Amino acid sequence: MKKLPPILDACCGGRMMWADKTDPDILAQDIRSEVVLMTDRGETRTLAVHPDIIGDFRKMQFPDNAFPLIMFDPPHLVNAGVNSWLRKKYGKLDKQNWQQDLAAAFRECERVLAPKGTLVFKWNTCQLPKRDVEKCFSMPPKFINRVGKTYIYIFYKQ
C-alpha cells in the first residue's frame, strides 16, 4: 500500500469545509460517490461527492495509528425525506441504529488515529442532542466549541 496522506476526512461528502478541496495532504473517504442535482425554487443545485476512497466510517480499511489528524463530520440527520436536498447534501443516519453506528465510528477513528494525533468532530444538534451523541465517544474530548447549534469537539490521543 502506498504511503497515506497525513489527514483523513472520514466522511467527506462534498468536501464543503475544506479550504482546498484538492489538497494532497487529505485523504477523503465517503460511503458514496455521486453527483446530486436538484431543482429548488427554479434554481438547479449541484453537489459532487467524489471521495478518494469509498469506505464506511464504522469499519475503515486503514491500519492502526495511520493518521495524525482526522476530521469526522458525519450526517446529523435521522429525519429527512428521501428526495430532500438536505438528505442528498449531508446524508442521513439510520434512525434506529445511529448511536451504535456513531460509537463504531468513534472506535474506528480512535484506532486509526496516531498517538499524539488529533481528531476533530463536528456535530449539529438540529435533530439529535449533544448529550446523546457524547455517549458514543470512545475517548474524552479535550475541548468543545459551540457556534449556534454546531459543536466542534477536539480529541487528542495519548
Image (cartoon, rainbow, N blue to C red):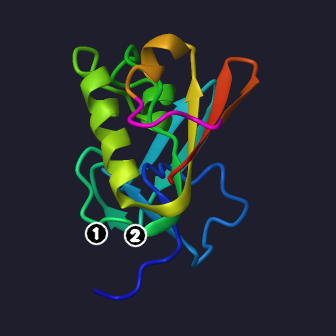
Q: Secondary structure at mark 2?
A: loop
Q: Main secondary structure of the magenta part?
A: loop
The part of the image, by quadrant, that contains residue 4 is bottom left
* Direction from residue 112 to residue 68 in the image, left or right: right
C-alpha gap between disc 2 and disc 1: 6 Å
Relative to the observer, which residue lies in front, 52 or 60?
Answer: 60
- Amino acid carrying mark 2 in the image: Ala
Image vertical order of residue 139 relative to residue 50, above or below? above
Residue 129 visible in the snapshot: no
Q: Position of residue 103 (x, y in %)?
A: 32, 32
Please identify the quadrant where the N terminus is shown. bottom left
Q: Residue at x 50, y 52 (%)?
A: 157
* Direction from residue 97 to residue 51 in the image, left or right: right
Q: Residue at x 62, y 65 (%)?
A: 21
Q: Which residue is mark 1?
A: 63
Evaluate if marks 2 and 1 touch, with contact meaning CB atoms under 8 Å apart. yes
Q: Position of residue 51 (x, y in %)?
A: 42, 62
Relative to the observer, which residue lies in front, 133 or 143?
Answer: 143
- Amino acid carrying mark 1 in the image: Pro
Q: Position of residue 77 (x, y in %)?
A: 44, 21
* Direction from residue 21 to residue 132 in the image, left or right: left
Q: Residue at x 49, y 37 (%)?
A: 89
Image vertical order of residue 85 relative to residue 68, above or below? above
Binning the other alpha carbons within 10 Å of mark 2 as few (below 14), some (14 to 19) or many (20 upward) gives many
Image vertical order of residue 1 relative to residue 114, above or below? below
Q: Secondary structure at mark 1?
A: loop
Q: Residue furthest front?
A: 158
* Direction from residue 110 to residue 6 in the image, left or right: right
Write the start and end of the magenta stretch as one range.
Answer: 137-142
Q: Which residue is mark 2?
A: 66
Say which mark, if any, is on residue 109.
Answer: none
